[in-house]
Image (cartoon, rainbow, N blue to C red):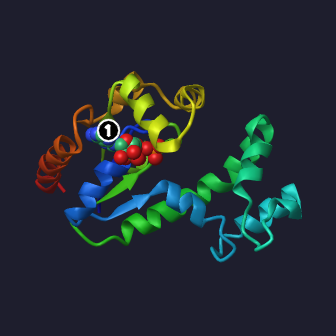
Amino acid sequence: MFILGLTGGIGSGKSAASGVFKTLGVPVVDADVVAREVVMPTSGSGALAQITMHFGQDILLPDGQLDRVKLRKKIFADATEKQWLNNLLHPLIRQSLLSQLHSCQGDYAILEAPLLIENDLLSYIDKLVVVDVPEDIQLKRAMVRDHNSKAQIESIMAAQVSRAQRLKVADYVLDNSADLNALAQQVKALHQDILSQA
Ligand code: ATP
């Protein structure tokens, strides 16, 4: 299966782009969704039990689900705990991503991941497409969507690779500085291009 990686900074338009791919019938596996799946009580991965053993029962919500907000707070300022969690979850997420991608039907599949470059997923994809916008547009769109302050979005942007780093490893770039229709046109053209090599 030919795998096209799809990435971009916060608010760049990954969901908008993957939505167009989906309308074209391309299966999309979303790394954020998989990351949530592996810590579900029903996932069978054992991750939630290990997290509970490590952080204690109060890391769970009353319904037995992981309290993601509490976990995020615990690891936010603690690099050791963050590393522990990443060591546990990253291999499980990777395994699940790969099995979902390889069971997709179609000419090719998309791996959508905000942190595709940061989390070393480049070796699992054949080609990379980056959704690109200038930082000022990115900031504005993310602030509106998330009802977040400029400082909050800027701190998330600072924790991601830079626009230049992303563009450096891109095989294809979708310029999302204009409207959604312009983005859709580019996705359709790219789809034809990928079909010819998948
Ligand atoms: P994240 O990584 O934070 O999940 P994303 O890369 O998936 O973000 P989207 O959610 O697709 O980004 O887009 C961010 C916001 O910008 C959304 O509210 C979306 O509707 C809007 N948006 C995306 N593309 C455009 C565009 N070309 N014109 C106007 N608004 C846009």
Q: Is residue 58 left or right of residue 64?
A: right
| Quadrant in the rendering for residue 103 | bottom left
Where is residue 71 drawn, in percent x and y? 75, 51
Q: Is residue 10 visible?
A: no
Determine the residue positioned at 53% across, 40% down.
147
| Quadrant in the rendering for residue 133 | top left
- 64 or 173, nearer to the observer: 64
Q: Is residue 133 left or right of residue 75?
A: left
Q: Quadrant of the N terminus?
A: bottom left
Determine the residue positioned at 19% across, 57% down.
198
Residue count near mark 1 (Cα–Cα under 10 Å), binned few <14, some 14–19, many ≥20? many
Where is residue 115 drawn, in percent x and y? 49, 42
Q: Is mark 1 within 8 Å of ligand 1?
A: yes
The quadrant of the picture showing ligand 1 is top left
Where is residue 122 drawn, in percent x and y? 42, 43
Location of residue 158 with respect to 77 vertically, above or below: above
Amino acid bearing label 1: Val
- 107 or 76, nearer to the observer: 76
Mark 1 = which residue? Answer: 131
Q: Is residue 93 visible?
A: yes
Where is residue 172 drawn, in percent x and y? 24, 37
Location of residue 131 with respect to 67 vertically, above or below: above
